[in-house]
Image (cartoon, rainbow, N blue to C red):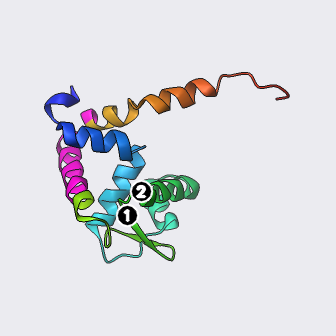
Amino acid sequence: MADQYVSDELRSFILERIDSVAQIEALLLVRSDPQSQWNAERLAERLYISKTEAADALSRLCASELLSRDDAVYRLEGVPEQNRVLIEQLLEVYSRHLIPVTNLVHSKPRRIGSFADAFKFRKGG
């Protein structure tokens, strides 16, 4: 279903660089108010997630060069232009076709592997 809404380039971008819907929502917030002091605590409050989850989302976005960090403040400023273009495309498609985009994020193979790993029996545990 996402095929008709998400270009191949954007699909690759999502599969390679976006691990959660929280990351997309973080990008939306940071873009919506670029002058704000976005940090894990503020993001957690706005997204109704834990501070740990917010910090993880922000950290992963920085590692993927989708946000930059100055001290504990996260922003789009300093992100490579090609990434900013794809971020804008992602946010545009997400705003119109939320379910297909979230389904794509949740379909990532490593998520399935991580889920399966939770059920493996470990020696001594």
In front here: 9 or 125? 9
Q: Farthest residue toward the right?
A: 124
On the rendered structure, is 92 left or right of 27? left
Near mark 1 (Cα within 10 A), the count class, few <14, some 14-19 or many ≥20, is many
Say whether residue 88 is magenta. yes
Q: What's the residue at 76%, 25% (across, down)?
A: 122
Q: Residues within 10 Å of mark 2 (few under 14, many from 20)?
A: many
Give the residue at x 56% y 31%. Answer: 114
Kindly state the secondary structure of the residue where label 1 is placed.
loop
Relative height, residue 45 to residue 1 (above, below):
below
On the question of residue 41 being in view, the answer is yes
- Residue in front for this viewpoint, 46 or 100: 100
The residue positioned farthest toward the left in the image shown: 4
Label 2 residue SS: helix
Q: Quadrant of the C terminus?
A: top right
Q: Amino acid at mark 1?
A: Leu
Contact between marks 1 and 2 (CB within 8 A): the answer is yes
Residue 116 lies in quadrant: top right
Residue range highlighted in magenta: 85-100
Q: Residue 56 versus residue 22: which sits nearer the camera? A: 56
- Where residue 89 appears, x then y in whole percent? 18, 51
Q: Which mark is residue 61?
A: 2
Question: Residue 124: where, in percent of width, then height?
Answer: 85, 28
Does the magenta-highlighted stretch encompass residue 72? Answer: no
